[in-house]
Image (cartoon, rainbow, N blue to C red):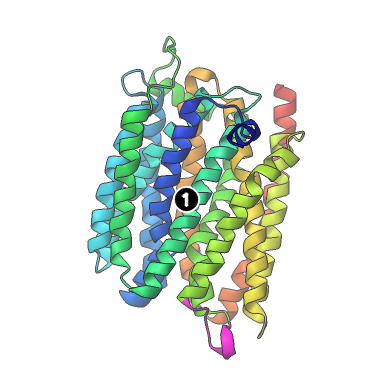
Amino acid sequence: MFEKLHSLLPNFRREIWILAVGRLLLQIGTGFTLFYAPIFFVNEVGLSATLVGFALGSASISGVIGRFLGGSMADSPAWGRRKTLLLSAAVSAIADIFLALADGFPLLVIGNLFMGFGIGLYWPATEAAVADLTTVANRNEAFAITRLADSLGLGLGVMLGGIWISAVGNYRLLFVLDGVSFLVFFAVIYFAIGSTKKTAKVTHSPVAAWLHAFRDQGLMVYALVNILFTTYISQTQSTLPLYFRNFVTGREGEVGFSPEAIALLFSWHILCMVLFQMPIIRLFARFRNAQILMFSLLIWGVGFVLVWVTGVINSWAIFVAVIALAVFAIAIVSYTPAASAIVVDLAPESLRGVYLSVSSQCWAIGYFIGPTVGGWAMDQSPVVAHSFWLVTAAVMVVGLIILRYLDSLIKVKA
């Protein structure tokens, strides 16, 4: 039986599986806080949605710095992928100390600035490590496996966090548990992962490496559309839970889904990501990465229209929300492996860390735009809050135009 199960699994190097387990544990901690932090600081601490959105978005400010440093450090012989990941875990654990103690806006901002810096260091290094450990033939599937681990961990964290809030109501302990997950990830990397970067002569100084990346037309066009994708993802994680809590009609006509219902909805969302990840990546194996991203963008638009529907109908809102979150799951799992793989394809091998850092900067920008604009919209009248999702869906058209152009650039380069 075990031999049959093993034969069904992709044939990756051992380090890929270890890294996937580490990322799963890390995302469990993230799931404890990601969907509940906006609700906690708005409804329990008493901050406005605009202030909370800005505080969450402030992580992107330090995240920009972290990503610049993380990309250069990941490519540096003195640091490399492993040491950069260790530093990332340590900084992120410190961030959770501030978040657990936050009782107002200043500590909330400080905690998010530390968290943004730690996550900024993390993403270029972990994505470059996956690229190092794979070949062109199995790279998309490897990115899918590690993203699957992310999704599974996030889902477990959301589910366990929801159970904890329902039973005890202590939001602050969730930040402590998130900090513990970063320490566990530190231990996994320290004891089980060696250097992944092949020894190669350094041909670019850090400044020259970044200038080379910024002059790459394909990378810059991709970065433009990737900001849209990451803004969309940030809306589902920061604005959508608040919208469901404060604007959508719940059971028996009351305003807002209960925290328990929101926890179940996002647990369902993560479960769908886990179930759909590998079938989607295999279904689109014969398509170009830019084409896969076009499909993902169309699905995002459908999902946001469904969210609008949940806010304007007086019944069955919970059932439409279930469908919307399943649609978002398909959008995310079709996006993430293709997005990482397209950057690796564009990057010279010696500059993978820097190129992936540019891609990761899009997350910093998107996670600043998303919570900030979304928080503002949730502070307005119900008409504005509901219409916000239709406007968000309409922006998809701009992204499709950019992706068509990107696809033509990549075909010419090939």
Residue 90 spot, x, y in % from top left: 27, 41
Which portion, as a residue range, is magenta? 249-258
> Does 183 sit left or right of 196 as displayed?
left
Q: Amino acid at mark 1?
A: Gly
- On screen, residue 134 versus residue 196, left or right, reads right
Q: Give the vertical position of 374 relative to 382 (above or below).
A: above
Q: Secondary structure at mark 1?
A: helix
Q: Quadrant of residue 74?
A: top left
**Horizontal and vertical percent for residue 289?**
69, 36
Of all residues, the one furthest to the top in this rendering is 201
User: Residue 284 or 121: which is nearer the viewer?
Assistant: 284
Q: Which residue is mark 1?
A: 153
**Residue under the point 66% across and 46% down:** 334
Does the segment drawn in magenta span residue 250? Answer: yes
In which image quadrant can residue 207 be found? top left
Instruction: Locate the N terminus by quadrant.
Output: top right
Residue 344 painted magenta = no
Location of residue 332 in the rendering, given as x and y in whole percent from the top left corner: 61, 50
Image: 86 above or below 196: below
Image position of 342 with respect to 98: above or below? above
Q: Is residue 96 left or right of residue 312?
A: left
Is 173 above or below relative to 151?
below
| Secondary structure, magenta segment, majority class | loop
Q: Residue furthest right?
A: 286
Given residues 338 and 308, the one toward you in this image is 338
Q: Is residue 176 left or right of residue 306?
A: left
Residues 413 and 137: in front is: 137
Q: Residue 117 location, x and y as percent?
A: 34, 44
Which quadrant of the view contains residue 126?
Answer: top left
Q: Residue at x 39, y 18 (%)?
A: 205
Within 10 Å of the Cα at label 1, are there few (<14), some (14-19), or many (20+) other Cα atoms?
A: many
